[in-house]
């Protein structure tokens, strides 16, 4: 049976997400930004936590783990091998292309260095679900804190190569401010303008803008489109390489 996904807010603008396998009852929390909303979501769904899948070491993604572990001591913690030192106490450390099971569901690990050097994302291939942490956001991407922007660009290109119908869950609700920025670098993009209106309506109603799909991001997210002629024209970088355009986009967004 297909995976069930439950998304909810944590902290200020972090998403919590539970992934549930109806066949076995296994349930994973994708990061634990904050314990109380994750525990409340488990209570509301009636699901029992079996796994905690960590994307990266930032506190707004792991801060809730100790309190959740106290309630579910058998929950297995999965984290990146490259973050062994910064995420101590995980039960399993994983690297590129390795598989993680949540009951009968299988996630493939994709290493996406950039936001942090050890960042990983979880791709449930059969269900076409991607949990992107702070690597990719709707209409944006994470800040390149621990690698030069071209490294993050390469990581995003790995995501861009996944099936277009992949549903993408992200670490934060940053979409409206990302949309405002996107319009400054890609003002002629009709699909982006339509999307901006939809996003504004959702946010005005207090609703989340996630999940998104890869198809939509490929059409509208400038950080996945450094090769686009319209964006290059807007930046005055018609003949630059993609990594240079990406770097310029990232630097402009940092200052926005
Ligand atoms: Zn982060
Ligand atoms: Fe974060």
Image: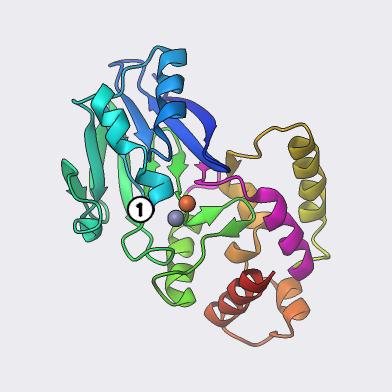
**Residue 64 falls in which quadrant of the image?**
top left
Q: Going 21% across and 50% down the picture, which residue do you hit?
A: 94
Vertical comparison of 201 with 191: above or below: above
Q: Do we see residue 237 in this rendering? A: yes
Q: Going 65% across and 87% down the picture, which residue do you hit?
A: 239
**Range of magenta residues:** 163-185
Q: Going 76% across and 47% down the picture, which residue do you hit?
A: 195
* Relative to 31, 5 lies left or right: right
Task: Locate residue 32, reporting x and y percent.
Answer: 38, 38
- Does residue 254 show up magenta in the picture? no
Front one among 30 and 153: 30
Q: Quadrant of the N terminus?
A: top left
Circle 1 packing at 10 Å, graded few (<14), some (14-19), many (20+), is many
Kind of element beneath mark 1:
loop
Task: Locate residue 255, reporting x and y percent.
Answer: 66, 73
Task: Locate residue 111, reporting x and y percent.
Answer: 33, 58
Vertical comparison of 202 with 191: above or below: above
Q: State the residue position of label 1.
A: 56
Whether label 1 lies within 8 Å of ligand 1 gets the answer: yes
Front one among 120 and 207: 207
**Residue 24 falls in which quadrant of the image?**
top left
* Relative to 250, 54 lies left or right: left
Q: Going 76% across and 72% down the picture, which residue do you hit?
A: 230
- Does residue 181 show up magenta in the picture? yes
**Residue 34 falls in which quadrant of the image?**
top left
* Name of the residue lying farthest toward the top: 46
């Amino acid at each position: 049976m297909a995976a069930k996904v439950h998304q909810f807010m944590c902290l200020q603008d972090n998403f919590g997400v539970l992934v549930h396998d109806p066949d076995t009852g296994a349930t994973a929390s994708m990061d634990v930004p904050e314990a109380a909303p994750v525990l409340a979501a488990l209570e509301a769904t009636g699901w029992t936590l079996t796994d905690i899948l960590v994307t990266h070491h930032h506190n707004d993604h792991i801060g809730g783990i100790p309190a959740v572990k106290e309630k579910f001591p058998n929950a297995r913690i999965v984290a990146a091998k490259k973050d062994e030192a910064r995420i101590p106490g995980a039960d399993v450390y994983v690297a590129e292309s390795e598989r993680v099971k949540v009951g009968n569901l299988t996630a493939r690990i994709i290493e996406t260095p950039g936001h942090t050097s050890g960042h990983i994302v979880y791709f449930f291939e059969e269900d076409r679900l991607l949990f992107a942490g702070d690597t990719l956001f709707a209409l944006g991407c994470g800040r390149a804190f621990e690698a030069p922007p071209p490294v993050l660009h390469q990581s995003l290109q790995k995501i861009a190569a996944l099936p277009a119908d992949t549903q993408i869950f992200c670490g934060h609700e940053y979409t409206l401010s990302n949309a405002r920025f996107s319009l400054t670098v890609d003002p002629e993009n009709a699909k982006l303008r339509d999307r901006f209106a939809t996003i504004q309506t959702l946010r005005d109603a207090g609703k989340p803008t996630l999940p998104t799909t890869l198809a939509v991001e490929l059409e509208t997210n400038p950080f996945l489109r450094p090769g686009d002629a319209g964006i290059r024209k807007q930046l005055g970088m018609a003949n630059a390489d993609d990594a240079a355009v990406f770097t310029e986009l990232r630097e402009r967004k940092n200052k926005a």
